[in-house]
Amino acid sequence: MNRVHNFSAGPAILPLEVLQKAQADLVDYQGTGSSIMEKSHRGADYTQVHEEATALLTSVLGLDDDFEVLFLQGGASTQFLMAPLNLLSKGQTADYINTGAWSTKAIKEAKAFGEVNEVYSGKDGNFTHIPTQEELAFNEHTRYVHFTSNNTICGTQFATEPETNGVPLVCDASSDFLSKPIDIARYGIIYAGAQKNLGPAGVTIVIARKDVLEGISKTDIPTIMNYRTHVQNLFNTPPVFPVYMVKLVLEWIQRKGGIPYFERFNLEKANLLYSAIDEDDFYSGTADLASRSLMNVTFRLPSEELEKKFIHEATAAHLDALKGHRSVGGVRASIYNACPMESVQALVAFMADFKTNHG
Ligand SMILES: *Cc1c(COP(=O)(O)O)cnc(C)c1O
């Protein structure tokens, strides 16, 4: 076996035991004579997979009866459009917190449907900062407050969700979904592309509060873009293989001890890595201390030349995909749920060696 230490921001590492289970099931799914990709999405085998994935997600997140779980397509990017299309009408307003490139895209889409208030923008500070509650003033009549819980590109993360005094949160949780506990009662909609923390690309998880769905009054929403179309029955063919993979990942999360386990584990990994960055000023973290992400750890070296060398030598040492996003440069280590402690330890050891040789 020749697996690298994989720090890819997305599509990202999957648990080895999940890949192996999928491999064992691939050609002949549980003795049925065909793979899960080759069966009707309305047949007994896939129905069971879909129902189990829903039940597992409900249990891992501790959802009560107030929420619906949907497995949709089109990525998180489609949700930038679908959320305001469903929830926002002309003459209504929605508050958006702009903490990076993904929030900026969500804002752009929402503007087609109603009044969008950018209640905070971190743009002038290169998105290195997450606003505190004092920096946020929501509009009295906002329909919802949209935020990006973790900013995959710049490496910042909300430590807790903003306080909105009962206004539903709409959250893009693509890159920290199920990595730590959330206060689910505050959310109207949570969406997440699976390919960062939950499975392969091709399925988008949408968790929607029933009263928010019931409150949708618009009548001109195209059928497939209407959240309510996807409640209860499958409207069209779901991404059967990604949903099956998500089910395996959820089983793995549950076996490990659920969200409480990953909260501890992710904190331990991030602390180890940030300690190595903070040791002296050879490495420097790019995010404000209080805004640092536990999922995407972004840092710089003393020069771009050294950064190039760092990434090149790291790759040769099987430490893969450490190059920062093209829009910000530097180094980014994505250490999602499935990233093992050994990979972070190997990176920290490499960083120490590199500093000795080039510092
Ligand atoms: C990756 C990412 C997206 C884009 O997801 P797609 O599934 O490619 O549309 C959106 N938001 C965040 C926070 C992301 O990390």
Image (cartoon, grey):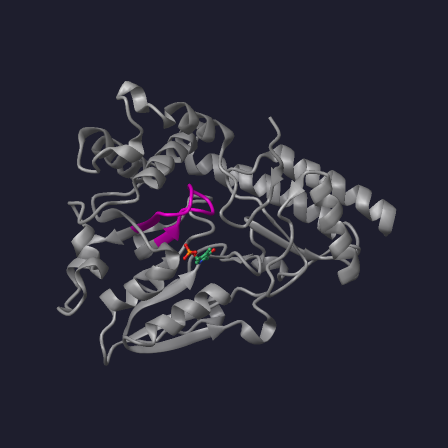
Q: Which residues are magenta?
A: 191-206
Question: What residue appears at the point 29 percent right and 63 percent down from the top-left corner?
Answer: 83
> Which is more toward the observer, 53 or 42?
42
**Camera-side residue of 242 and 208:** 242
Where is residue 105? Give x, y as percent.
43, 68
Left or right of 206? Residue 5 is right
Dominant secondary structure of the magenta stretch? loop
Would you identify the image quadrant in which residue 31 lies? top left
Residue found at the far top of this picture: 31
Residue 44, picture quadrant: top left
Q: Is residue 339 above or below residue 328?
A: above
| Quadrant in which residue 138 is drawn | bottom left
Asked whether residue 99 is in view, the answer is no
From this view, report whether residue 344 is shown above or below residue 87.
above
- Residue 335 drawn above or below residue 49: below
Asked if the stretch drawn in magenta spans residue 200, the answer is yes
Q: Nearer the viewer, residue 282 or 62?
A: 282
* Position of residue 114 measured from the top left corner of the image (x, y, whole percent): 28, 77
Instruction: Estimate the x, y position of residue 296 in percent, counting from the top left.
Output: 57, 51
Q: Is residue 6 left or right of residue 92?
A: right
Q: Is residue 185 visible?
A: yes
Find residue 53 and report its horizontal and vertical position in percent. Answer: 30, 36
At a point 36% along the width and 41% down the height, the residue shown is 242
Q: For the image shown, how many numbered marks are present on the structure?
A: 0
